[in-house]
């Protein structure tokens, strides 16, 4: 979800999205993850050996299992969402390409976004991949006030996105930028970096002598969209590719439109336990391999997410 502003970071994953307690909640209890939806995808390689070029870089435990368990929040089309009982989208397709390089299956399970990192650090998942914006706060396990909540995570960055604003079709309130939201009611998913972006903008509004934002934070993005569609909020914010997809698909393209430019663009990263440096290194190599062989570009082209492409993987490049 975007740099502090991305899920769910591509503005502000961005889910395009500075980080609140949700993103770093190493201390949150596992039951906070909510209902889980499993999704297969791909075929396992041998559990003990593989001819895949990067198999030997994986930790022995994962080599033996033949699976990398992935936590996600499958509510962010086109990045990750459920269709026909399966989790599909940009991230699952990138993961499938990584799996071919590494010789293992990436097995996705959907849960609440704000429980992903705590579940990762508890051992439920090997990685979290859900349009998660890489930020220093998430790396260090800090909430938005700098309080230590957990050990943090490492990120293998593979995409970039910023926060985008979407409004009712026709833009009845004539919103042109995030600055126009002063004194307005805005809907957002709780625990995302773009919720933090709105909080930051609200302070900027009051500093400028204007009214603060009236921020309504919901447990999932669908509720936020419904609020905007009904006119209960003048705008919603999301990762840029997600907002564009919402505007294109909702009610056949007649419900929403995206306004202004994406802001606070930052990297999306695959989150990995800080103690699992071997897996982090293997994933970095795999991301670079699919960029080099063209598979990465094909995935982004398929989903219309070319604006988020990066030239190479990076570890902990978020600010």
Image: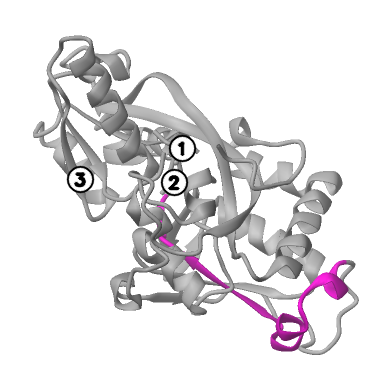
Residue 180, image x, y percentages = 24, 14
* Residue at image coords 35%, 76%: 30
* Residue at image coords 71%, 83%: 66
What's the distance in space between the residues labelled 1 and 2, CA to CA?
Answer: 5 Å
- The residue that disc 2 covers is 1
Disc number for residue 217: 3
Disc number for residue 16: 1
What's the magenta region? Answer: 54-76
**Is 126 displayed left or right of 229 in the figure?**
right
**Is 237 displayed left or right of 88 in the figure?**
left
**Dot 1 alpha-carbon crowd within 10 angstroms: few under 14, some 14 to 19, many 20 or more:** many
Where is 131 relative to 178, above or below?
Answer: below
Q: Is residue 254 visible?
A: no
Q: Are marks 1 and 2 in contact (CB under 8 Å)?
A: yes
Q: Is residue 227 visible?
A: yes
* Residue at image coords 12%, 17%: 211
* Residue at image coords 66%, 79%: 67
- Quarter the C terminus occupies: top right
> Mark 1 or mark 2: which comes first in sequence?
2
Was residue 22 drawn as part of the magenta stretch in this picture?
Answer: no
Which secondary structure, mark 2?
loop
**Is 43 displayed left or right of 152 in the figure?**
right
């Amino acid at each position: 979800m975007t740099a502090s502003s991305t899920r769910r970071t591509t503005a502000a994953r961005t889910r395009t999205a500075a980080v609140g307690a949700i993103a770093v909640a190493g201390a949150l209890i596992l039951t906070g993850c909510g209902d889980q939806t499993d999704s297969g995808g791909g075929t396992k390689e041998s559990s003990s050996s593989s001819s895949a070029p990067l198999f030997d870089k994986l930790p022995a435990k994962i080599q033996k299992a033949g699976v990398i368990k992935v936590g996600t929040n499958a509510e962010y089309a086109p990045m990750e969402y459920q269709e026909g009982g399966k989790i599909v989208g940009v991230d699952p397709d990138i993961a499938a390409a990584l799996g071919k390089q590494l010789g293992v299956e990436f097995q996705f399970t959907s849960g609440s976004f704000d429980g992903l990192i705590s579940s990762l650090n508890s051992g439920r998942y090997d990685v979290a991949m859900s349009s998660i914006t890489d930020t220093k706060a998430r790396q260090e396990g800090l909430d938005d006030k700098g309080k230590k909540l957990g050990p943090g995570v490492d990120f293998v960055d593979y995409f970039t996105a910023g926060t985008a604003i979407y409004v009712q079709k026709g833009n009845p309130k004539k919103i042109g930028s995030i600055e126009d939201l002063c004194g307005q009611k805005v809907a957002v998913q709780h625990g995302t970096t773009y919720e933090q972006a709105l909080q930051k903008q609200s302070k900027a509004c009051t500093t400028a002598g204007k009214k603060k934002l009236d921020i309504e934070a919901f447990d999932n993005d669908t509720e936020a969209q419904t609020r905007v569609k009904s006119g209960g909020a003048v705008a919603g914010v999301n990762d840029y590719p997600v907002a564009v997809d919402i505007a294109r698909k909702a009610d056949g393209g007649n419900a929403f439109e995206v306004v202004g430019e994406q802001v606070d663009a930052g990297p999306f990263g695959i989150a990995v336990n800080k103690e699992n440096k071997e897996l982090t290194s293997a994933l970095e190599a795999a991301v670079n391999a699919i960029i080099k062989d063209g598979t990465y570009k094909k995935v982004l082209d398929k989903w219309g997410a070319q604006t988020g492409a990066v030239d190479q993987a990076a570890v902990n490049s978020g600010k």
